[in-house]
Image (cartoon, rainbow, N blue to C red):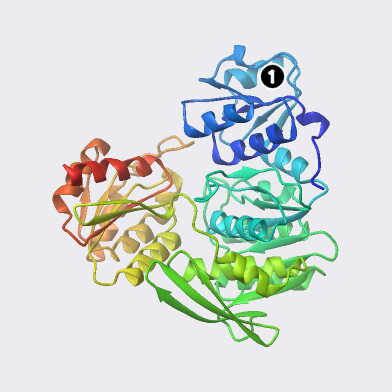
Amino acid sequence: MAPGIPAAMERPHFIGIGGAGMSGIAKILTQRGAKVAGSDTKESGTAEALRALGATVHIGHAAAHLADDASCVVVSSAIRPDNPELVRAAELSIPVVHRSDALASVMEGARAIAVAGTHGKTTTTSMLAVALSELNLDPSYAIGGDLAGPGTNAAHGEGAIFVAEADESDRSFQKYDPEVAIVLNVELDHHANYASMDEIYESFETFAGKIVPGGTLVIAADQPGAVELTERVRALSAVKVVTYGESETADVRVHKVTPRGLTSEVTVILNGKYLTFTVSVPGRHYAHNAVAALAAGVALGIPAHNLASALGKYTGVKRRLQLKGEAAGVQVIDSYAHHPTEMTADLEAMRGAASDARLLVVFQPHLFSRTQELGTEMGQALALADASVVLDIYPAREDPIPGITSDLIIDAARAAGADVTAVHDKAAVPGTIAGMAKPGDLVLTMGAGDVTDLGPQILDHLSS
């Protein structure tokens, strides 16, 4: 049975309860019977979903929102020290708990699968949650995005398995003790917290070292950073390592990925036997995510053929190449990609799915620090599109860095031969795209910020 409510989590208050990671923990605790409260900056579907489960959600941050009898205050790394509710917690001597510690506490006692990597975590975690649910194993799960089917990012299940997205951005994934850990890739990102690849490797090594005795590390055999990490883990740890990918040395070998429009057919070789299944999203990288999920489930003792069939039931995650609609013969698709590798993968996936279509991209850079370090590579990725519109940087939790603007990306894109237009007013984008698009085109809104809001607006302009 799934674990219950830790004592510190009986009456938690979440600052930023509407966030992807925070809301998932809040949902699980509410479903388990905890008296959950919290605040967020604005109304959202997530806030409404939490209220429907019984949580109290305040809009805006104010000291008065924090109840005197709160058992703890849960924060993410994005919450600033001067937040009035955090200040009030100190005045009341209410313990402050980081989001990762809260998640670790609700995972305690479960057979945990923790999914890590610079990108692909949300998709892979979601694939596992869907497949395990399809097999009536009733897992608990906490994901960084809403599943297209159930429409939620988290759930409390009565089964023994807990599947969690493990965030490396602030080293918080080091708090978990999984039975199975997945590492999809290891690349330099989150530059405000990591100064070098050595620091990244050290962080992932610590994560792998937290796997429980007898547990398994499932890791990519093709991605250079993952290969380096595999060598380090094998040298320092007794953890069982299972590799997956197209390499001939992979333990779970990807034999073939065959595009089928907006789906793929994947054939793997596992224990000397061929196994073929369908992935209901396009692109080789999503196929590899599914194979990682397959390998993790097998490591828990679930029959491979059952998992393969169940993985075919996965229908996607919001913002991961999600079709938003079609108008005037133009399809609008939304992508969360914000790292150059993700951008390239999604653009190549769309090229493979509709090779005859023109591909128009609306890209919003995410974070000044990421743009400073990877802006050139972002611009080079945009050269895969027929034309792109680039917005100003979405700051999220960061303050501006002098001299760092979207121009860094635009200049690199143009140097790579890309057709790029700078648009500083987000409200002007729908009209701009409607003027560019022709029947048969694909429009991809791309980025981790609020660029996702533009999809419906573009469809409205195309329809008018």
Q: Name the one closer to the observer, 431 or 464.
A: 464
Give how far across and how far down residue 300 sits, in percent: 76, 65
- Label 1 is placed on what type of residue? Ala
In the rendered view, does 12 fall on the left or right side of 2?
Answer: left
Give how far across and how far down residue 276 sits, in percent: 56, 79
Q: Residue furthest right?
A: 213
In the rendered view, does 442 fall on the left or right side of 260?
Answer: left
Give me the residue at 37% from left, 68% from top: 348
At label 1, counting other C-alpha atoms closer than 10 Å, the crowd grade (few under 14, some 14-19, many 20 or more) is many
Give how far across and how far down residue 181 sits, in percent: 70, 61
Where is residue 104, by image quadrant? top right
In the rendered view, does 137 fall on the left or right side of 335?
Answer: right
Give me the residue at 73% from left, 25% from top: 72
| Vertical placement of residue 173 versus 214, above or below | above
Q: Quadrant of the C terminus?
A: top left
* Residue underneath mark 1: 89
In the rendered view, does 264 fall on the left or right side of 243?
Answer: left
Q: Secondary structure at mark 1?
A: helix
Give me the residue at 26% from left, 66% from top: 416
Q: Name the one closer to the observer, 196 or 381.
A: 381
Q: Name the one closer to the observer, 221 or 406.
A: 221
Q: Can residue 11 be seen here?
A: yes
Where is residue 267, by image quadrant? bottom right
| Vertical placement of residue 397 versus 448, above or below | above
Give me the residue at 49% from left, 36% from top: 397
Where is residue 375, by image quadrant? bottom left
Q: Can residue 118 be seen here?
A: no
Give how far across and how far down residue 8 sits, in percent: 79, 29
